[in-house]
Amino acid sequence: MDRELQSAERVKIKLSGIDPQTLTSFAMGNSDIDLICTYGKITLQCRYEISDYTLGLILKTISGVDNAATHETEILCDFDDIQNYQRMGYTLVSYSRHDGKYRVTFNVPFSSAKAVYSLTVAFFEELQKEKTLKKDFYWSGKDHNIIQLFNELKKIDGWEIKEIKNKDN
């Protein structure tokens, strides 16, 4: 990227409320959803029941901005069910026997549309039962990725910037 383009991008980012390379966190969402982004992690918090469509839209948008994003989940299941999760796009990380079942850790890659869909369904089912949801995703997002994510997600009703934290200089 040449210097003029880099400079223009830095000005665009700064106008968005982010001081390039000093961002600590960027919180966005609406009355039902908080999405908190840092350089290595995105935390999704839903306090009320949201639609499966909205939940899917958020995960699909994250995937579109950084398809290298991942979610790690631990599931207690029968040994035979491990392959079913793998068929849904989950990647097996580890497993161990626990009280007659298996405690299995999966990595859910956002590069797989099937995995993102399966994750949306699992999250929605959990949200219906628990009425709250808090999940972490790991990504390599930088300033421009965070702005791109916000610009895509602000299409959701009531979506806004909630808080921007920059490092003190």
Image: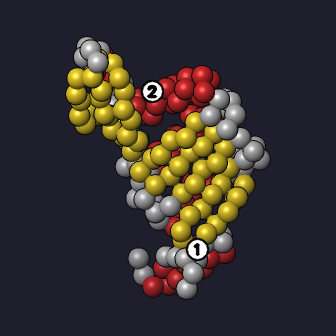
Q: Position of residue 19 (x, y in %)?
A: 58, 77
Can you identify the residue that label 2 sits on?
A: 118
Q: Residue at x 41, y 51 (%)?
A: 138
Residue 159 picture location, percent across and down: 72, 49
**Viewer-side label of 1, 2:** 1
Residue 64 shows in the view: no
- How far apart are labels 1 and 2 at the CA level? 35 Å
Q: Which residue is mark 1?
A: 166
- Where 32 falls versus 130 (above or below)? below
Q: Position of 144 compared to 68: left or right?
A: right
Q: Secondary structure at mark 2?
A: helix
Residue under the point 30% across and 27% down: 103
150 left or right of 1?
A: right
Tag of residue 93: none
The amino acid at mark 2 is Ser
Residue furthest out toward the front: 99
Q: Given the image, on which type of amino acid does mark 1 rest?
A: Asn
Viewer-nearest residue: 149 or 167? 167
Residue 63 seen in the current view: yes
What residue appears at the point 68 percent right and 30 percent down from the top-left corner? 49
Q: Residues within 10 Å of mark 1 (few under 14, many from 20)?
A: some
| Quarter occupied by the C terminus | bottom right
Q: Earlier in the sequence, mark 1 or mark 2?
A: 2
